[in-house]
Image (spheres, helix red, strand yellow):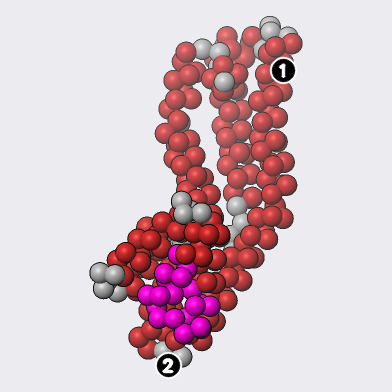
Amino acid sequence: MIAFLFYESAAGLLVVLAVFPAALVRVRHSSCEQQQRELKRQFKECIRVLTASLYAGYSVENAFGAAQKELEQLLGDQADMCRELRQINGQLKLNIPVDGLIESLAWRSGVEEIATFGQVFAYARHNGSNFTRILRDASERITDKLELEREIQTMIAAKQMEQRIMNLIPLGILLFVRLTNPGFLDVMYSTWMGRGMMTACLILYGGAFLLAERIADIKV
């Protein structure tokens, strides 16, 4: 579509295909961020159940088992966090240290909150005189941060939708002109100066698209 609207030629398609790898990386990055946000939401529920079980006097192994059972009822057994808990509980039965399992999950997921929880968990278990209190305080801070992120995402959801619509408007205008007055833009496709201007417009459009994405990406 972009090759047709901006170049109307096979050569234009080659120009667009040249930036396709970068666009694919961007799409994959966006998909990864979405998966991380969902994992954070599930992890928040996990540490809530985990700390409650530890406060109730459960051992670490039994607390992880209880977290798995409750999250499977709450989220379904195919949820990412449930699969991770099944893997953790399976390795706990082989006497693999839980600290390393949490660290492995943090490394594979790339979620900062899981890494922070793992560090606090390891410190509290080996050095803390009050393991459950330290873990509860850390869990509350992590939960507050994740809740703040969720509230921000809810607040800007409408603006993000507006941003996506605004991103499509320039293409819609160009398509409308092409369909309603086919010969109006012929000079932009038949001369080198016109093609250069269309290329400049495409670059500006791409830059505006990336800028809008960055503005809407708020980190806590």
Identify the residue at image location x=41%, y=89%: 128
Q: Amino acid at mark 1?
A: Phe
Left or right: residue 21 compared with residue 208 = left
Label 1 crowd (10 A; few <14 / some 14-19 / many >=20): few
First in sequence, mark 1 or 2: give its number.
2
- Residue 134 locus on image (x, y percent): 49, 85
Residue lying at the far top of the rendered structure:
183
Task: Tell me how many marks there are.
Answer: 2
59 or 179, nearer to the observer: 59
- Name the image quarter holding the C terminus: bottom right
Q: Quadrant of the N terminus?
A: top right
Q: Is residue 131 above or below residue 71?
A: below
For badge 2, the amino acid type reads: Ser
Residue 15 in the image: above or below residue 64: above
Q: Position of residue 167 (x, y in %)?
A: 66, 35
Residue 88 visible at all: yes
Q: Position of residue 116 (x, y in %)?
A: 45, 72
Q: Which residues are magenta?
A: 50-68
Residue 205 sits in which quadrant?
A: top right
Circle on res. 176: 1
Residue 129's disc is 2
